[in-house]
Every structure is written in C-alpha cells, then in structure tokens.
Image: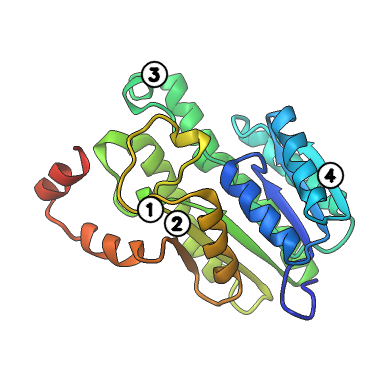
C-alpha cells in the first residue's frame, strides 16, 4: 500500500519504455517507490528503463513483454505484471500509445487496425483486468495517459485523436464506477511533448519535455482531481478551443 506520506510503493508501468513513462517512473522511485514492474515491446529500451529505476533507488525491478497490437494478450500481460510485483499494487500506469502517420494510415485498413489496437483496444482490455485486480485488493490507483488531442479530434490526426478520445471518455466512466471502492483512476492529458514519438514534427505552443510532464503528474497524484493537465494552462485553452465554430477550428488546427 501507499506509504505514510501517501506515495505509491509498488508500481506497474504498462508501456514503460516511453519517454514520458520513464520520466514518471524515475520521479516515483525518487519519491520512495521500491518495486517497479515495467512492460514494453522494445527489449533494449526496457532494460535501459529498468536500469534507470534501479539507479534511482528501486530495490525490486522486473520487466515483462507487452504487445499492444494484440489486444487478446492484454489480460495475460497484466497478470504477469501483478505477479511480478509480489504483493498489493499501489499504482498502475498505462502509457501505451502510437502517433502514427495520418496521411499514410488513413488509407490502410491494416494501419487503422494497428492504431485502434494500440491506442484504444489494448488499453481497454488491460483496464478491465486491472480494475478487477485492484477491486479485489480493495485499494490502488490507475493513471491513464490520454492526450489533449482527445478533447476535440482534428482532421490531421483523427485516427490517433479519435482513439484517444474513446479511451479518455471510457476512463471517465470507469472512474465513476470506482467511486467509493478504495480504487481511483486519473487521466493525464498532456499537450505536445518532446519525445521520440514527436521527433521531427514542428514544435507547437505549450510544448513541454517529459520531465515537466512528470512533475505535473507527481503533483496531480497528490491531489484528488480526476484529470491532470500538462501544462495546466491547457485546461483553459481547450475549454475555448472545444467550443469554436467548426470552420474556425479547422482553420486554426490544420495549419
């Protein structure tokens, strides 16, 4: 369970090789998390993330394979992660995501299936198993990485944004289902972040780095708000953007 300061001690990170996930993991370990289970597809990067967790002070670190293109594998992946944790789990982070290439992907049924599997279907199946396990232990928290792109889907990224929108809305309802159970869910909505996934793309306003996102997460985990915005100002920016007339929205967002 969380320590006396309300900080998670046993953490599972699904998608533990992402730049944002690695930054969050290091800060969690620095704040006394001692057990870290990392799941990912890239073995080399998974080993690097595990080494970082140990370097920052985690005493128990384990890794397991994750294939987000195969939603049927999600339940088994979650089961392996919980077993590796060796006890009650305080926090499960879902950091699985694929930005893709909208222009190429929108004409390919195979690419579309991949985008939906990674960004929506796999996380939803995993969430079902996570919810069951945390309810059984009577405690725990879930953090799901969504995106500000889920708030209002734009034409130039409708596959990614549409999948994230579905996940974001589902998580809001799932969080309602957990009220009063001892288990809670928070949604992280970052704006553009300087990561491998966005490398080569033009930088947009309010772009942050993984460490900044991790700082906002640590602050958010200490509170009760359901949604953690990164940076927080985007909460107000998107309140305006989501209500713009469609013609103006397209003109602004498709530049």
Instruction: Count neighbours of disc 3 (C-alpha within 10 A) and say few if under 14, some if 14 to 19, many if 20 or more.
Output: few
Residue 34 visible here: yes
Quadrant where the image shows the C terminus? top left
Residue picked out by circle 4? 62
* Residues marked 2 and 1 touching at CB (< 8 Å): yes
Residue 89 horizontal side relative to residue 244, left or right: right
Instruction: Count neighbours of disc 1 (C-alpha within 10 A) and say few if under 14, some if 14 to 19, many if 20 or more.
Output: many
Residue 164 horizontal side relative to residue 72, left or right: left
Q: By what rule are the colours in the image chosen?
A: rainbow
Residue picked out by circle 3? 108
Instruction: Count neighbours of disc 4 (C-alpha within 10 A) and say few if under 14, some if 14 to 19, many if 20 or more.
Output: some
In terms of image quadrants, where is residue 65? top right
Residue picked out by circle 2? 189
Q: Earlier in the sequence, mark 3 or mark 4?
A: 4
* Residues marked 3 and 4 touching at CB (< 8 Å): no
Residue picked out by circle 1? 148
Depth check: give the residue in front, 225 or 53. Answer: 53
The kind of secondary structure element at disc 2 is: strand
Depth check: give the residue in front, 121 or 209. Answer: 209
The kind of secondary structure element at disc 1 is: helix
Q: Earlier in the sequence, mark 1 or mark 3?
A: 3
| Disc number lying in front (3 or 4) | 4
Residue 65 visible here: no
The kind of secondary structure element at disc 4 is: strand
The kind of secondary structure element at disc 3 is: loop
Quadrant where the image shows the N terminus? bottom right
Residue 222's spot in the image, x, y percent?
A: 61, 75
In terms of image quadrants, where is residue 198? top left
Residue 37's spot in the image, x, y percent?
A: 78, 48
């Amino acid at each position: 369970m969380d320590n006396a300061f309300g900080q998670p001690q046993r953490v599972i990170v699904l998608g533990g090789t992402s730049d944002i996930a690695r930054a969050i993991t290091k800060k969690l370990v620095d704040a006394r998390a001692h057990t870290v289970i990392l799941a990912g597809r890239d073995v080399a990067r998974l080993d690097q993330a595990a080494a970082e967790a140990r370097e920052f002070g985690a005493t128990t670190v384990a890794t397991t394979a994750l294939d987000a293109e195969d939603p049927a594998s999600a339940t088994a992946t979650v089961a392996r992660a919980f077993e590796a944790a060796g006890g009650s789990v305080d926090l499960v982070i879902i950091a699985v995501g694929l930005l893709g290439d909208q222009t190429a992907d929108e004409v390919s049924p195979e690419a579309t299936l991949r985008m939906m599997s990674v960004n929506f279907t796999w996380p939803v199946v995993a969430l079902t198993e996570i919810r069951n396990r945390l309810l059984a232990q009577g405690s725990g928290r879930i953090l799901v990485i969504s995106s500000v792109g889920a708030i209002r889907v734009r034409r130039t990224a409708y596959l990614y944004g549409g999948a994230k929108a579905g996940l974001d809305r589902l998580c809001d309802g799932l969080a309602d289902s957990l009220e009063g159970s001892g288990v809670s869910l928070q949604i992280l909505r970052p704006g553009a972040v300087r990561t491998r996934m966005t490398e080569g793309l033009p930088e947009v306003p309010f772009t942050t780095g993984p460490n900044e996102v991790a700082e906002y997460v640590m602050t958010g985990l200490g509170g009760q708000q359901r949604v953690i915005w990164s940076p927080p100002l985007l909460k107000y920016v998107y309140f305006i953007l989501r209500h713009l007339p469609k013609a103006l929205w397209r003109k602004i967002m498709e530049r």
